[in-house]
C-alpha cells in the first residue's frame, strides 16, 4: 500500500489516503489524476520500474499501478505523465509473441494533458544511422541489419 498524503485545511496533520494495487482483468480501466509517481523494485529484472498512483474517478479511490510489464513501462516512459495530469490505462489482456515462445501483457495509455513534446524530444536526441553516415561520410556496417 502506498499512502498519499493530503494536507487538510482544518488541521495541521496531513490526512493519509490509502491506496491499493491494481490487479486488472482484460478490459479493466483505471482513469483519473495522478497523485504520486515513485519507483518500485523488481527482483525479477533487478531494476526499478515506475509506480504511478492514480485517483480513479469511477471508484473514487487511489490506485497504485505497478508498471513492471514492459509494454506499460514503455508507454509511460514515452508520455512521462506528471503529478496532477490525467491518465487513463486500459489492460487488454495477454497475447502470444509472434514466435509463440511467450506471452506479453498489452496496455494502452492515454494522457490527455500531455502535449507529445516528450516523444518528439526523445526522438530528436536519437541519432539515426543515416544521420551518422551523413555526418561521418561512412555507411553503417551491414552486420547490424536484421535481415
Image: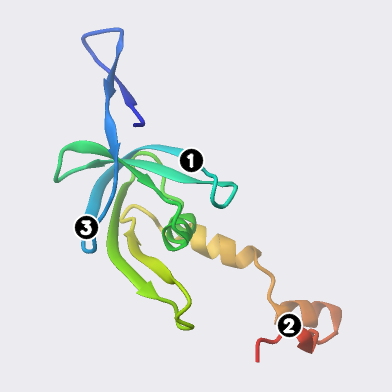
Mark 1: give few (<14), some (14-19) or many (20+) Cα within 10 Å: some
Camera-side residue of 32 and 61 = 61
Mark 2: give few (<14), some (14-19) or many (20+) Cα within 10 Å: few
Q: Residue at x 65, y 63 (%)?
A: 125
Question: Which of labels 2 and 1 is toward the front?
Answer: 1
Q: Which residue is mark 2?
A: 144
- The disc, 3 or 1, on the residue closer to the chain's N-terminal end is 3
Residue 112 position within the rendered picture, expressed as x and y whole percent measured from the top left:
30, 56
- The disc, 2 or 1, on the residue closer to the chain's N-terminal end is 1
Residue 29 position within the rendered picture, expressed as x and y whole percent measured from the top left:
22, 56
- Disc sitting over residue 94 in the figure: none
Q: Residue at x 65, y 67 (%)?
A: 126
Q: Which residue is mark 3?
A: 28
Mark 3: give few (<14), some (14-19) or many (20+) Cα within 10 Å: few
Quadrant for the N terminus, please. top left
Q: Residue at x 28, y 37 (%)?
A: 20
Whole-angstrom CA distance, mark 2 to mark 1, is 34 Å
Q: Which residue is mark 1?
A: 40
Amino acid at each position: 500500500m502506498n499512502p498519499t498524503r493530503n494536507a487538510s485545511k482544518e488541521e495541521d496533520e496531513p490526512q493519509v489516503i490509502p491506496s491499493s494495487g491494481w490487479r486488472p482483468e482484460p478490459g479493466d480501466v483505471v482513469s483519473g489524476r495522478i497523485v504520486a509517481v515513485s519507483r518500485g523494485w523488481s527482483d525479477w529484472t533487478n531494476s526499478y520500474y515506475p509506480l504511478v498512483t492514480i485517483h480513479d474517478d469511477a471508484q473514487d479511490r487511489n490506485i497504485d499501478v505497478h508498471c513492471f510489464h514492459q509494454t506499460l513501462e514503455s508507454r509511460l516512459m514515452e508520455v512521462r505523465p506528471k503529478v496532477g495530469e490525467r491518465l487513463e490505462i486500459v489492460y487488454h489482456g495477454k497475447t502470444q509473441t509472434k514466435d509463440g515462445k511467450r506471452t506479453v501483457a498489452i496496455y494502452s495509455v492515454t494522457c490527455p494533458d500531455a502535449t507529445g513534446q516528450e516523444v518528439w524530444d526523445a526522438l530528436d536526441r536519437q541519432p539515426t544511422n543515416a544521420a551518422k553516415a551523413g555526418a561521418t561520410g561512412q555507411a553503417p556496417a551491414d552486420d547490424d541489419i536484421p535481415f
